[in-house]
Amino acid sequence: MNALVSEWIDKAEADYYSAWREYRARKHPNYDGAGFHAQQCIEKYLKGFLIHCGQASIWGHDLIAVAEHCIPHFPELELEKPLLALLTRFAVRYRYPGESASKAEAKRALQAAEKLRKLLRTKLELTK
């Protein structure tokens, strides 16, 4: 794995752990932030995967749009579009006044990220 892909994965992992930390906080849990970091984790995994496949990373937070570029190299992602759509809502929707994520919504985002992270780590031949 090249250094740039490793850096994308390291950043994705930092978001993964930040998501869980925000969700589990005893004082002042930030469910918006938990979902946002879950979305960012998968966005960075997808972009790192693109680079791993010799493709250019693309701009954007819509995980389905990013995944469309990955699907030729990872067709199984087609089946995960509902999870990608769920996570995409956390990229912007809950970041500004007007809407807030509930604990249950944040939990669903974390579960989606957990499943997608595992799939991507397997595809990238990462252990753990």
Image (cartoon, rainbow, N blue to C red):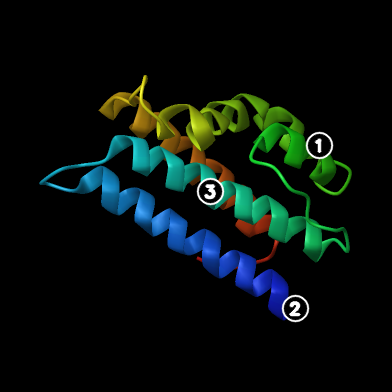
What residue is shown at x 76% (from left), y 31% (from top)? 78
What residue is shown at x 28% (from left), y 48% (from top)? 22
| Residue at the far left in the pictured view | 27
Q: Which residue is mark 3?
A: 40
Amino acid tagged 1: Glu
Q: Earlier in the sequence, mark 1 or mark 2?
A: 2
The Cα–Cα distance between marks 1 and 2, rounded to whole angstroms, is 23 Å
Disc 1 element:
helix
Amino acid tagged 2: Asn
For the residue pair 20 and 97, the one nearer the viewer reads as 97
What residue is shown at x 44% (from left), y 41% (from top)? 36
Which label was assigned to residue 68? 1
From this view, report whether residue 16 is shown above or below residue 125: above
Classify mark 3: residues with Cα within 10 Å, few (<14), some (14-19) or many (20+).
many
Q: Which residue is mark 2?
A: 2
Classify mark 1: residues with Cα within 10 Å, few (<14), some (14-19) or many (20+).
some
Disc 2 element:
loop
Residue 12 pos. (x, y %): 54, 59
The Cα–Cα distance between marks 1 and 3, rounded to whole angstroms, is 17 Å
Residue 126 pos. (x, y %): 62, 67
| Residue at the far top in the pictured view | 98
Residue 64 pos. (x, y %): 71, 32
Q: Earlier in the sequence, mark 2 or mark 3?
A: 2
Residue 5 pos. (x, y %): 70, 70
Amino acid tagged 3: Gln
What residue is shown at x 65% (from left), y 31% (from top)? 80
Q: Quadrant of residue 94?
A: top left
